[in-house]
Image (cartoon, coloured by chain):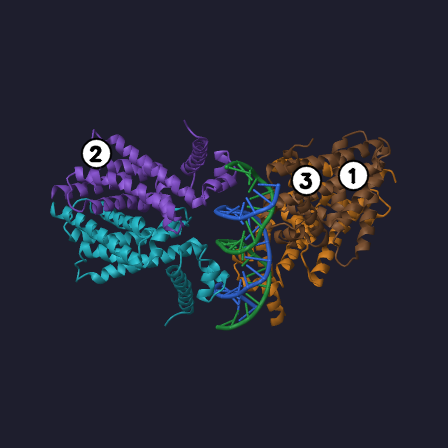
Chain colours: A orange, B brown, C cyan, D purple, E green, F blue
DNA sequence: AATGAATGAGTCTTCATTCAT
DNA sequence: GATGAATGAAGACTCATTCAT
């Protein structure tokens, strides 16, 4: 039987989720920098103050949005596994880049935090935890592809390379969204092949 | 004999350089986002208005700082060439990552523009020009390393991968600067080897 | 019993009024163009930000000041009515010109908006509404004076003529305030007679 | 034989005219407030400094543009005279309003000076002189129309009324330029008739 | 006399965060 | 716990005017 405290806790989680989803929705719609607290509050149907009841500051909320995105990617990758066989390395790259192309927020936030977003110790740890989770999938895929040595480092390199593709080419001026998607996908395939080559040579 | 116009032009270049250096200095010292026009003006020893005489807006100045950085990298790479043999692929990665580690501004600016800095057509073109120049060096190095097919795309992939390493790990929370430098360098070596492997297999 | 929402609304109105009065006071004291947000905020005893909580931008505040002025004129005119008989045409001109002479802001704002102050759709409509109200009084007076045809257009012509007197002679250089008041009043009487003549001839 | 001093003086006048025409051209093209010294200088093909050699400040230049406009109106009116008979009162109103509709600058400047443009004693006098010239034409027309008493004051009233029409209705929001022209012309006709009525009754 | 780069005070506006209710 | 109005520091940018060349 659930105690009162437990119910309260559930309510709290629910409301927190409301805010989170509203933020994610807004980030999906528009530029990262143009989303304001006021707007998030309005979209979530709560007051500004409430947001600060659940999040110490905006950056903490951003972390949650980021984490949620990372989870979605993890789930997308898990959905690709056949039994306990992870998806192919090529497929992983494809899925990851496709997600990033559809969720600009994701790497925009990476950039934001890199540009000096300050995080609480706790948020940093949650961030690390989910990143590790994501990286675990990359490691599995890499191993399944036949890479044996320095798998963690290699996974980090692959992860970096994919992020780098988006950072470097996702807002290439004068190119249509479709062209960008095609180009980033192409680069992702090239990168995937690079790592596969590595696997074969071992 | 230098005409008057020529002298004026030189003076103009000089003053523009003054502003540029001041901005670069400030960016090196502190966070990209916390640098203000007022501060740049004071550091350069000119008035705020003067900055706007030389640059339409701050982003145009940022582009110049960025370009200057890119030029420095190009020069560093050119200094590594032996006759007409470009430096090794490994060395290129090392030099590039080292420079980025010492000039956070550089990829902070990449991020800034990615997050929606608006540029004039002219600035965009200058930006593209220097990026192409940099990429040309990467292409040369890649070719010298023995890669034959899709060299431009491969160069882009390498360039992306190196940027991605910095974006993903340059501000890793809880790590010392030294640790970060070591780790990014290590990832860069791994990436370099990946591309070399590719070369051998052709 | 007043609900909480109602009280809140009243408070809001009150504060908005505070800002409005402060602005009006400043406009009365000094030149329209030299009034700043900072000053209005200080005079109203609120922060700058608060002003922007109540008004989207300064021009919207200006509209409110303008509207308040128009209302005052309407009230002055209504106070002149005897039962349901509007005041005489001559009296209307006299009252209007006298008010304008004491509230330079009023036609300075007309000019400001004419010189390109940008207004929201909503503000434009409020502006139109109060102008129509004012014009309605003019129409009534004109009709009471015996003018039968094209009363609305005639009212507009009278309204224009009175405004024109102020625009053309209210800041006539080298004349004392008193001289200006006498002269504009004289012109207003002449204009009034013109319209009365018109009435008689019908 | 023209002395050197005289030639110099002519050159000076010519250059001053160049600046004047450039300013007038710009004012005709765009909003009064958005014209800058830099732009005038560029359009006139002279330097900013040169403008200040010919005009103490911008407002003095504006006065000249204004005067030039007033002269054009005077010439238009004079062109309408038959022998020594001035044009009809109705025609005067029509011509004046038409000119104002095509030269927004003209009454925008009236407003500008009214909003506190500071003028030198000399500029004020030149301004008065040309205004008097313009008013003289109005007086003539009024007299020719049969008005005998207080002709100067009546002319001022007519002048004011026409200005007022433009001030009040020239930027009426939500109306096309054509509609505005039609409406102001209509009001001008009404005003003209008012004054004619007055003439007849004398 | 002509030049035009330098000046800088002063402008409006933004928006994350606080805190009294 | 929820609210949302108040806060105000901080930002980029403008542009008439000056003055050394």
Query: Is disc 3 in contact with disc 1, using a CB cutoff of under 8 Å?
Result: no
| Up-down relation of residue D172 to residue D13 (above or below) | below
Give the CA distance from mark 3 to mark 1: 24 Å
Q: Residue at x 28, y 55 (%)?
A: C180
Image position of A120 (left or right of A16): right
Tell me the subunit letter for badge 2.
Answer: D
Label 3 vs label 2, nearer the camera: 2
Q: Position of residue A113 (x, y in %)?
A: 68, 54
Identify the secondary structure beneath mark 2.
loop
Of residues D86 and D132, the one drawn nearer to the viewer in this rendering: D132
The residue at which mark 1 appears reads as: B75
**Circle 3 — which element?**
helix
Examine the rendering and report whether any part of residue B195 can be seen.
Answer: yes
User: Which quadrant does the C terminus of chain D fall into?
Assistant: top left
Same-chain status of marks 1 and 2: no
Which class describes the residues within 10 Å of circle 3: few (<14), some (14-19), or many (20+)?
A: some
Image-based side of B56 in relation to C174, left or right: right
Mark 2, Cα crowd under 10 Å, few <14 / some 14-19 / many 20+, is many
Q: Secondary structure at mark 1?
A: helix
Residue B5's disc is none
Label 3 vs label 2: CA separation? 74 Å
Q: Residue at x 37, y 44 (%)?
A: D108
With respect to residue A121, does B111 lie above or below? above
Viewer can see residue A95: no
Name the quadrant containing residue A166. Answer: top right
Q: Residue at x 58, y 54 (%)?
A: A23
Same subunit: marks 3 and 1: no
Q: Nearer the viewer, residue C202 or E7?
A: E7
Residue A85 shown left or right of residue A113 in the figure = right
| Residue C190: % across, % down | 19, 50
Eyeballing the image, is C101 above or below D150? Answer: below
Parent chain of label 1: B
């Amino acid at each position: 039987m659930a105690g009162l405290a437990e119910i309260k806790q559930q309510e709290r989680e629910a409301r927190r989720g409301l805010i989170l989803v509203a933020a994610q929705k807004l980030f999906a719609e528009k530029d990262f920098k143009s989303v304001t607290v006021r707007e998030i509050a309005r979209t979530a149907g709560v007051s500004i103050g409430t947001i600060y009841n659940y999040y110490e500051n905006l950056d903490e909320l951003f972390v949650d949005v980021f984490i949620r995105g990372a989870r979605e990617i993890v789930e997308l990758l898990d959905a690709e596994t056949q039994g306990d066989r992870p998806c192919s390395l090529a497929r992983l790259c494809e899925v990851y880049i496709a997600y990033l192309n559809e969720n600009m927020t994701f790497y925009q936030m990476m950039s934001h935090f890199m540009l000096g977003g300050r995080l609480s110790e706790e948020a940093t740890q949650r961030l690390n935890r989910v990143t590790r989770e994501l990286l675990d999938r990359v490691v599995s895929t890499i191993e399944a592809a036949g890479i044996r040595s320095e798998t963690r480092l290699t996974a980090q390199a692959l992860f970096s390379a994919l992020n780098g593709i988006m950072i470097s080419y996702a807002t290439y001026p004068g190119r249509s969204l479709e062209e960008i998607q095609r180009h980033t996908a192409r680069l992702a395939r090239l990168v995937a092949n690079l790592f596969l080559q590595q696997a074969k040579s071992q």
